[in-house]
Image (cartoon, grey):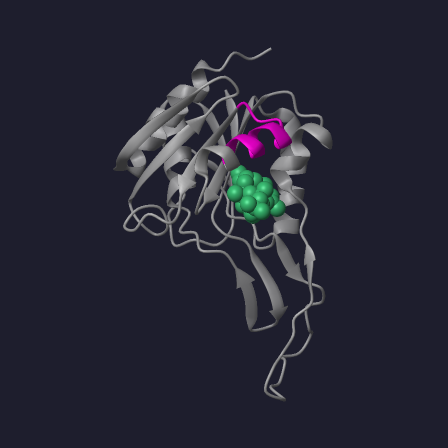
């Protein structure tokens, strides 16, 4: 298969020296890219800034903002058989990015933020993508219920749900535990190394029937 994977955080500039971002090491997305390439798939990794090395044999488009990630996905999605959205995309960006460094003044500062496009949420409705669609859901409560809502709303074949309130796994960690939420069933993958989990997730994606 040709598989597109988004990974890492996005950076939304406030001024030349500051940005808003999400907590994300990119490890899960890069592990998925590595596992998919290892299984013989042709992988395109579209990633925000991380400290990680691009896995061997993986095509790579580096991006910074959600808008750049949206464009890179839009440009390549029609060539893909499957797309996995592991990126932690900033839901909002500053309404304006100042050209010069913002100087401090006063005791409080109010930022105006505007919504970023939902990249995964645009795949079915906007881009007309008919391939296998896999999302992630980072939640602090009601994991399965919130993941199911995202699965249905975004037209996914699978949502990989992460409980980000559990200490020691998830963010920055080499380990994770996830729920695989399919339209008709839920499977739990207990805590494991992100590379092992990535292999299991790719195997599950390979099993999803394609038309
Ligand atoms: N996602 C995306 N573009 C966005 C926001 C999210 O592609 N602008 C993708 C993520 O990569 C992930 C999925 O949508 O695969 C769910 O992301 P999440 O932040 O958990 O959900 P949201 O839909 O943004 O809802 P909320 O943050 O309000 O829970
Ligand atoms: Ca979000």
Seen in the image, is 164 located left or right of residue 19? left
Seen in the image, is 161 located left or right of residue 4? left
Which residue occupies 52% across, 59% down? 21
Which residue occupies 57% across, 55% down? 64
Residue 197 in percent (x, y) is at: 32, 32
Q: How many marks?
A: 0
Viewer-side residue, 73 vs 113: 113
Q: Residue furthest bottom?
A: 106
Image quadrant of residue 61? top right
Q: Which residues are magenta?
A: 147-157
Which residue occupies 60% across, 21% down? 131
- Judged from the image, the quadrant occupied by ligand 1 is top right
User: Can you say which quadrant of the picture contains the C terminus?
Assistant: top right
In the depicted structure, whether residue 109 falls above or below residue 141: below
- Whether residue 85 is visible here, answered yes or no, is no
Which residue occupies 44% across, 55% down? 23
Residue 166 lies in the magenta stretch: no
In the depicted structure, whether residue 189 falls above or below residue 165: above
Residue 79 in percent (x, y) is at: 62, 25
- Whether residue 103 is visible here, answered yes or no, is yes
What is the magenta segment's predominant secondary structure? helix
Residue 149 lies in the magenta stretch: yes
Residue 57 in percent (x, y) is at: 41, 33
Residue 203 in percent (x, y) is at: 38, 20
In the depicted structure, whether residue 210 falls above or below residue 132: above
């Amino acid at each position: 298969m040709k598989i597109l994977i988004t990974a890492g955080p996005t950076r939304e500039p406030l001024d030349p020296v500051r940005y808003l971002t999400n907590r994300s090491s990119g490890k899960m997305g890069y592990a998925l890219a590595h596992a998919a390439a290892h299984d013989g798939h042709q992988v395109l990794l579209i990633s925000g800034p991380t400290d990680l090395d691009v896995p061997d044999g993986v095509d790579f488009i580096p991006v910074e903002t959600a808008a750049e990630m949206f464009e890179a996905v839009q440009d390549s999605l029609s060539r893909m058989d499957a797309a996995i959205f592991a990126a932690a995309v900033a839901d909002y960006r500053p309404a304006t990015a100042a050209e010069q460094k913002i100087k401090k003044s006063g005791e409080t500062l109010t930022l105006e933020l505007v919504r970023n496009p939902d990249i995964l949420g645009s795949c079915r409705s906007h881009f007309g993508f008919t391939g296998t669609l896999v999302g992630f859901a980072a939640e602090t409560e009601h994991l399965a219920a919130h993941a199911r809502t995202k699965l249905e709303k975004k037209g996914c074949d699978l949502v990989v749900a992460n409980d980000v309130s559990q200490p020691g796994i998830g963010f920055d960690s080499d380990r994770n535990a996830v729920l695989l939420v399919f339209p008709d069933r839920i499977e739990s993958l207990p805590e494991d190394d992100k590379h092992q989990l990535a292999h299991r997730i790719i195997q599950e994606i390979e099993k999803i029937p394609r038309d």
